[in-house]
């Protein structure tokens, strides 16, 4: 076994140990009060610091007192409609104070808030609303327009939204009117434990088959306290996270630490690179929570003499690529960057606490034995097992799939998904010894001698584009239903100057002349969210498969969207301004490769 990398790891552990002792000591000294659920903390903060600013959203400021009053209005509304402890409430809202108030109301009731992607439409949206088994949904004005067309498909659920979009529908109630009439009085708070389920955060939900991952109160509460200590946050800080709150990162790394510390949390409805500096100045942000792509977008904005005219002292996030890291830190004068790695449903958490460029972090000191890198066979699409039947472990510097041991003594539990059947697909048994169980992250990483990890890629069918995960099999399922399309294969391709992979689809039309670029564009626009729509299309006579009928995508990814590499297959590029796909010839390819055409 190669997980014990010796002296170098031990030295780094000893250097980091004081930070974790401080976290432990702080939680121990706080006693049971350190593990109060969000509903109780809402009330506590409103009593102790009612006038301190809790939230800043664009031009809006909300004090802790006003925030708690808003939480109470949502709580009374939900209780009036029969929501009790353990019930699920769908929350489909853009980033806003109201979204976090609805989340807080679920905490006070002991309900489970299912955080729905605010960009979903059509089949995907109908699936998410029904899969959670919620009887109540809270939807803001921006999202009601997408919900109204699928109301008849949602079954026994009452949607509280903006009735201006469909006042006559029997399943739609006016959320603004109901909130206006709801009481701000402090309700009785449910007897909720930190082990209870707090939220569902949907993963791999790009096309209508999302899986709700379980987030317990413990992860939100203990995680918020621990991160605040690790990042050195105080009540004077303001954490700015402009990414969607329905994702775990902005919610748990941006909002939770600030909320528990009595600091301020700032966000906006949609990220804007051009408004970034204006935002962080007016909000007086000191902590910036990012995903890697945001930093690249910021680097594309014109440089100005005021790029360092802000108060940000630390940036924390995931996916900051090495080619952007130092230039971003230098240009904007940010003293400390803490990159990280984790999954909402997983038991793996890495933090790059000491700013090693390019690394997504390391485990807590003296817990490295709980993580392994298993060798992965891309052609077979599975972990490699040796003659003894156990998974072959990667040596230092080798790339493999990150695996997290499921152990009662581990610092993080595997909570998994709401549907237990989805959990088994993430587990590997008898991995390194008889009877052990590991979580498969589905990600390829490598490790150095000091046990710092470096993200390499996502395995197989899932790739990341525009900050979202795209599950290719789900996209294929929909594309195969497009007019005149017989078969499809979806994969991610590298585009110079961008993070992640752009979507590309090889499609097999029913006949050679039946591919209609305008009709195909219309179909993908209606069937898929923007980040999951193929940017490139390759029209071919058939899909290359293995003997067990798995699509061979490695060659397709290598050939990419280069007209000179695809053997004469017609290539197309999605042109949203023209609402069609246009032929991808060599001059257009050169513009994309050189960055002249910005995607």
Image: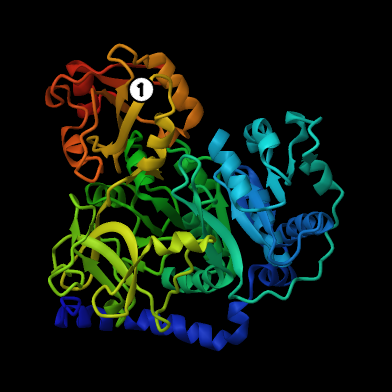
Q: Can residue 274 be seen in this view?
A: yes
Q: Which of 180 and 197 is in front in this view?
A: 197
Image-quadrant location for residue 230: bottom left
Q: Quadrant of the N terminus?
A: bottom left
Estimate how packed mark 1 is, as few (under 14), some (14 to 19) or many (20 or more) residues with alpha carbons within 10 Å: many
| Residue with the most extreme top position | 513
Q: Residue 72 at x, y = what percent?
A: 77, 60
Q: Nearer the viewer, residue 229 or 520?
A: 520
- Colour scheme in use: rainbow
Q: In which quarter of the image is the C terminus?
A: top left
Q: Residue at x 65, y 34 (%)?
A: 150
Count of labels shown? 1
Q: Residue 514 at x, y = what percent?
A: 34, 13
Above or below, 95 against 345 in this view is: above
Q: Residue at x 57, y 46 (%)?
A: 128
From the viewer's perspective, tell me whether residue 11 is left or right of residue 52.
left
Q: Residue 598 at x, y = what percent?
A: 31, 27
Image-quadrant location for residue 481: top left
Q: Residue 415 at x, y = what percent?
A: 48, 68
Q: Residue at x 25, y 43 (%)?
A: 550
Location of mark 1 (residue): 574
Above or below, 371 against 208 in this view is: below
Above or below, 539 against 177 in this view is: above
Q: What element carries label 1?
A: strand
Q: Can residue 305 be seen in this view?
A: no
| Residue with the most extreme front position | 547
Above or below, 70 against 354 in this view is: above
From the viewer's perspective, tell me whether residue 593 is left or right of residue 131.
left
From the viewer's perspective, tell me whether residue 484 is left or right of residue 99.
left
From the viewer's perspective, tell me whether residue 463 is left or right of residue 569.
right
């Amino acid at each position: 076994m190669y997980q014990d990398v010796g002296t170098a790891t031990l030295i780094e552990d000893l250097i980091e140990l004081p930070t974790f002792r401080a976290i432990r000591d702080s939680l121990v000294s706080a006693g049971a009060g350190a593990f109060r659920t969000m509903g109780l903390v809402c009330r506590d903060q409103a009593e102790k610091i009612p006038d301190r600013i809790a939230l800043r959203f664009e031009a809006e400021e909300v004090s802790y007192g006003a925030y708690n009053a808003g939480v109470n209005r949502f709580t009374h509304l939900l209780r009036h409609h029969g929501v009790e402890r353990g019930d699920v409430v769908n929350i489909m809202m853009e980033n806003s104070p109201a979204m976090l108030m609805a989340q807080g109301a679920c905490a006070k009731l002991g309900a489970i808030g299912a955080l729905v992607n605010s960009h979903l439409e059509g089949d995907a949206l109908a699936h998410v609303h029904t899969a959670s088994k919620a009887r109540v949904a809270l939807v803001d004005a921006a999202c009601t327009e997408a919900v109204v067309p699928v109301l008849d498909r949602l079954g026994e659920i009452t949607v509280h939204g903006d009735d201006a979009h469909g006042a006559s529908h029997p399943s739609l109630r006016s959320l603004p009117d109901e909130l206006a009439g709801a009481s701000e009085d402090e309700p009785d708070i449910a007897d909720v434990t930190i082990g209870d389920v707090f939220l569902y955060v949907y993963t791999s939900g790009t096309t209508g088959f999302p899986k709700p991952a379980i987030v317990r109160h413990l992860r939100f509460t203990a995680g918020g306290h621990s991160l605040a200590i690790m990042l050195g946050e105080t009540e004077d800080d303001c954490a700015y996270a402009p990414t969607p709150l329905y994702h775990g990162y902005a919610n748990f790394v941006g909002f939770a630490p600030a909320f528990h510390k009595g600091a301020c949390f700032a966000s906006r409805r949609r990220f804007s690179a051009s408004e970034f500096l204006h935002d962080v100045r007016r909000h007086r942000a000191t902590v910036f929570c990012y995903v890697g792509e945001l930093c690249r977008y910021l680097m594309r904005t014109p440089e100005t003499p005021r790029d360092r005219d802000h108060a940000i002292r630390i940036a924390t996030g995931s996916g900051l690529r090495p080619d952007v890291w130092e230039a971003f830190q230098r240009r904007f004068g940010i003293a400390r960057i803490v990159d990280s790695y984790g999954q909402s449903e997983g038991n793996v958490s890495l933090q790059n606490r000491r700013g090693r460029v390019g690394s997504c972090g390391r485990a807590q000191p003296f817990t490295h034995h709980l993580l392994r890198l298993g060798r992965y066979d891309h052609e077979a699409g599975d972990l490699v097992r040796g003659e003894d039947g156990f998974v072959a472990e990667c040596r230092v510097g080798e790339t493999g799939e990150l695996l997290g041991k499921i152990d009662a003594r581990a610092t993080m539990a595997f909570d998994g998904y709401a549907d237990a059947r989805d959990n088994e697909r993430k587990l590997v048994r008898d991995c390194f010894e008889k009877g052990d169980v590991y979580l498969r992250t589905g990600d390829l990483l490598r490790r150095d001698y000091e046990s710092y990890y470096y993200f390499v890629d996502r395995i197989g069918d899932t790739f990341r584009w525009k900050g979202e995960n795209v599950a290719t099999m789900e996209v294929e399922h929909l594309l195969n239903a497009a007019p005149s399309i017989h078969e499809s294969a979806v994969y991610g391709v590298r585009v110079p100057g961008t993070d992640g992979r752009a979507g590309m689809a090889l499609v097999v039309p029913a006949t050679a002349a039946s591919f209609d670029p305008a009709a195909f564009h219309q179909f993908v626009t209606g069937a898929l969210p923007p980040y999951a729509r193929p940017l490139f299309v390759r029209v071919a006579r058939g899909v290359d498969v293995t003997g067990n009928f798995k699509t061979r995508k490695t060659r397709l990814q290598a050939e990419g969207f280069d007209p000179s590499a695809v053997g004469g297959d017609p290539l197309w590029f999605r042109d949203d301004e023209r609402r069609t796909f246009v032929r991808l010839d060599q001059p257009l390819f050169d513009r994309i490769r050189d960055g002249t055409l910005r995607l």
